[in-house]
Amino acid sequence: MNIQMLKGKIMESGITQEAMADAIGMSRCTFYRKMKRKGNTFTVEEMNNIVKTIHLSKEEAVSIFFST
């Protein structure tokens, strides 16, 4: 997962990481942990919610969530 690209896209969308966590129905603590890769990665449902919230293209989503 490309965390830096995801952080950049969240910033470009004009919302905070706190607002993103709220928008996808996740606790802020869990969202931060996943962003720091200390917990599990995002589920498919969570990824879909992120894509919808910040309006990622298919290519952007693949680059963010499926990069090594």
Image (cartoon, grey):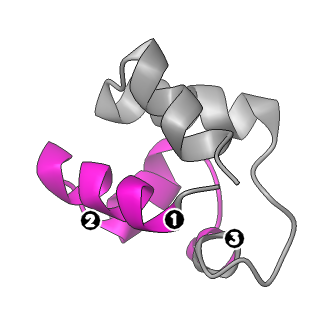
**Above or below for 22 versus 35:** above
- Judged left or right of residue 1, residue 3 is left
The residue carrying mark 1 is: 3
Determine if the magenta segment contains residue 8: yes
Contact, mark 2 vs mark 1 (Cβ under 8 Å): no
- Which badge, 2 or 3, comes first in the chain's sequence? 2
- Which residue extends farthest top? 58
Q: Amino acid at mark 1?
A: Ile
Location of residue 7 (image quadrant):
bottom left
Is residue 14 in view? no
Q: In front here: 60 or 22?
A: 60
- Which badge, 2 or 1, comes first in the chain's sequence? 1
Determine if the magenta segment contains residue 15: yes
Q: In front here: 20 or 66?
A: 66
Q: Amino acid at mark 2?
A: Thr
The residue carrying mark 3 is: 34
Question: Which stretch appears magenta?
Answer: 3-31
Q: Position of residue 46 (x, y in %)?
A: 68, 39
The secondary element bearing badge 3 is classed as helix
The secondary element bearing badge 1 is classed as helix
